[in-house]
Amino acid sequence: DTAVSQTPKYLVTQMGNDKSIKCEQNLGHDTMYWYKQDSKKFLKIMFSYNNKELIINETVPNRFSPKSPDKAHLNLHINSLELGDSAVYFCASSLRGAEQFFGPGTRLTVL
Amino acid sequence: KQEVTQIPAALSVPEGENLVLNCSFTDSAIYNLQWFRQDPGKGLTSLLLIQSSQREQTSGRLNASLDKSSGRSTLYIAASQPGDSATYLCAVGGSWGKLQFGAGTQVVVTP
C-alpha cells in the first residue's frame, strides 16, 4: 500500500532514556515533516526536511534530533526523555510543500 | 505570527443535517489551506486542499471555501451521516509547507 508509515505505534519508556521513531513514505514525495500533538490535541510542527535538507526547525529542545537518510525516510531521535515529551508524534510528507499526508502516529509515554 | 481559530469547538447535529465548520486565520499571506479529519486514536486524513489562488474546492459531499482577504475558510458537509463523526482540523500552509493548525471542531452526528 502507498502510505506514510511510522514505527513503533506505541512507545512506553522511563525518564532519562533515549528513543527513536522511524518514518517512511512510498508516495515519491520530496518533503517530510514531524509534528507533535500534545495532551490537549493541539498539533504543532517540529521539523521538516526537503530532499534530505533541514528546512524547518521550530523552537524544539535540542534533545530532539531529526535525521533524513534519504527522501523516503525521516527519523526522530529523542535524548534524555522527560515527562513533558509524552505526546503523539506524527510524520507527514508532501510533494514540494503541497497537500500533506500523515502517518498513523506514534504515542510516546514517558514514565 | 499566524493564529488559526476554529469555531465552534464542538458541534452535535442529527443525521441528515448539513454541517458548517469555520476556520479563521490572522495572516492572509498563505500558500494554501488544508482540511483534515481525525478519528479518535488515529492519524489525520486529508479531506481537501485549497490553493491560495482558489476560492473553493469540492469532493463529494464536502465543499470548502477560502476568502483570503477576510482570513476565513468554511467546510460544508452535506447530508451528514453518523460516520462523519470525528474531529475536523483546519491547517494554514505557509512557506516550506509549514502547516499551522487550529484546535479543531469535534463533530457528533446522531442517528
Image (cartoon, grey):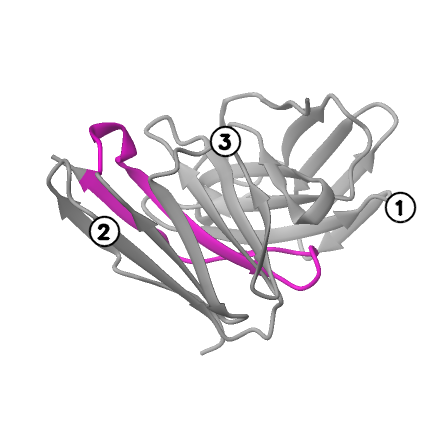
Q: Is residue A23 visible?
A: yes
* Residue ID at (55%, 51%): A48
Left or right: where does residue B27 sit relative to residue B10? right
- How many residues crowd mark 2 within 10 Å: few (<14), some (14–19), many (20+)? some
> Earlier along the polypeptide chain: callout 2 or callout 3?
2
Return the residue nearer the eye: A80 or A45.
A80
Q: Is residue B32 magenta?
A: no
- How many residues crowd mark 3 within 10 Å: few (<14), some (14–19), many (20+)? few
* Amino acid type, mark 1: Ser
Residue A78 screen position, x and y as percent: 29, 46
Mark 2 element type: strand
Mark 3 element type: loop
Picture layout, residue B27 above or below residue A13: above
Circles 1 and 3, Cβ within 8 Å, touching? The answer is no
* Amino acid type, mark 2: Lys
State the CA–CA distance, disc 1 to disc 3. 30 Å
Quadrant placement of the C terminus of chain A: top left
The disc numbered 3 marks a residue on which chain?
A
Q: Which residue is mark 2?
A: A19
* Residue ID at (57%, 29%): B102
Q: Which mark is residue A59?
A: 3
* Amino acid type, mark 3: Thr
Q: Is residue B78 visible?
A: no
Q: Quadrant of residue A110?
A: top left
Left or right: where does residue B49 sit relative to residue B12? right
Q: Which residue is mark 1?
A: B53
Q: Which residues fall within the magenta stretch?
A: A81-109
- In this view, the mark in front (1 or 3): 3
